[in-house]
Image (cartoon, helix red, strand yellow):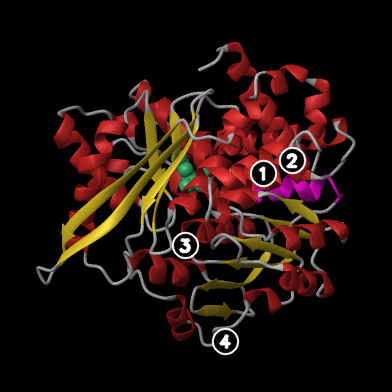
Amino acid sequence: MDERLLPIWRHVIARNPGEPEFHQAVREVLETIGPVLSKRPEFARQKIIERICEPERQIIFRVPWEDDSGEVQINRGFRVEFNSALGPYKGGLRFHPSVNLSIIKFLGFEQIFKNALTGLPIGGAKGGADFDPKGRSDREIMRFCQSFMIELYRHIGEYTDVPAGDIGVGSREIGYLFGQYKRLTNRYESGVLTGKGLSYGGALVRKEATGYGLVFFLREMLKARGESLKRKTCVVSGSGNVAIYAIEKAQQLGAQVVACSDSGGYVYDPDGIDMAALKEIKEVQRKRISEYAKLRPKAKYHPGGNIWEVPCQIALPCATQNELNARDAATLIKNGCIAVAEGANMPTTPEAVRTLMAARIAFGPGKAANAGGVATSALEMQQNACRDAWSFEFTEQRLAAIMENIHRQVHQTSEEYGASGDYVTGANIAAFIKVAEPMVAMGLI
Ligand code: GLU
């Protein structure tokens, strides 16, 4: 790390004790942006980095609700509004038992940079709750969402903060959240949430966007190395929204996706993952991935298995943070992997990233590679603002163009700063400059 950044780094650790994921996300950025300070001394003078590391606003609240048996349940809700230099705060809500302030802050911090890379006018935020949707009935989910919104509504708005989904929050939850917001405010404010259902202001391609965008980015990464997805064996961890649509697009572009997973284990299907079976289990029945093997005779379920042991040329971690460690990276390299692109946020540990880059594997960091989801959220906001609805084809073309543009920027920046092909450095520097410039222009706020 540049020695000018070391005191900032130490200060972040001291001020935010017990937040390892947040520290990890900040460290990764500080380790790469040193060279910008020499070129742009005004950023140091204006303490832009110190300001970026401190959220503009953090909200923590109680979410009481009643389960189906009549028992009172208490969860903790969060919204961390990190940076609004480029536009209203924007970022998803995560409902998962692991959620805590550290996780929301790491996600919110990364979101600032990711959103900047899209080139669209959105600031960075993240929120959620330590609520576990697993095994909960629809009515319980609805009651939880309504209680969550009773506090959140006063902090959000089309021009203020626009939440969306993340792990555990899909169109069902967004529907309940939107309904409650509308009722509390008496405003049909479509642009207050994204990832809405198509029947009330949602946008085509939003559901597919993170996974599709990831594969569009991957296609560019491979192209830069004279490669393509055709006939490549691919492994995708996770089986949520990001994983499902990454698998779909990778298959459409000619790859053979042979495995996907959930927290219980992975399935291997030598014929390639069957989309109809996968969607039926995950989207319709909301069941575990182990069910997949029951529908496909040749598929095998590996309970507790490590998906990164499945030989592949392309690995797409699409589950959750720190799911791919240095040992997994070494296994991927040994098995002939040529590219890793992150569909999840921070799924690759810092040691694993170093291992992959040292072996000259093409590595696409989530901030760039998975930005298609939030970019398409910004397109949903555009459609809501002009009360319009675009076709699937048009929206997908826009998404593809955005991902190509992100790749171009990241690649060019890596070259400009003498780190050709290092997408971590390229993404961090390109995004940092995009956020720092308006912060300087707007003065000390
Ligand atoms: N949670 C997604 C992300 O990490 C989407 C956020 C959004 O659409 O606002 O980018």
Residue at 57% in and 55% down: 21
Residue range of the region highlighted in magenta in the rendering: 214-226
Residue ID for mark 2: 6
Mark 3 is surrounded, within 10 Å at the Cα level, by few (under 14), some (14 to 19) or many (20 or more) other residues, namely many
Judge whether residue 219 is colored magenta.
Answer: yes
Residue ID for mark 4: 298
Decide which of tag 2 and tag 3 comes sooner along the chain.
2
The mark lying in front, picked from 2 and 3, is 2
Q: Are marks 2 and 1 in contact (CB under 8 Å)?
A: yes
Q: Is residue 237 left or right of residue 98?
A: right
Amino acid type, callout 3: Gly
Circle 2 SS class: helix
Decide which of tag 1 and tag 4 comes sooner along the chain.
1
Image spot of residue 402 (x, y percent): 62, 34
Real-space Cα distance between discs 1 and 4?
Answer: 53 Å
The mark lying in front, picked from 4 and 3, is 3
Query: Could one spot residue 344 in this view of the protein?
Result: no
Decide which of tag 4 and tag 3 comes sooner along the chain.
3
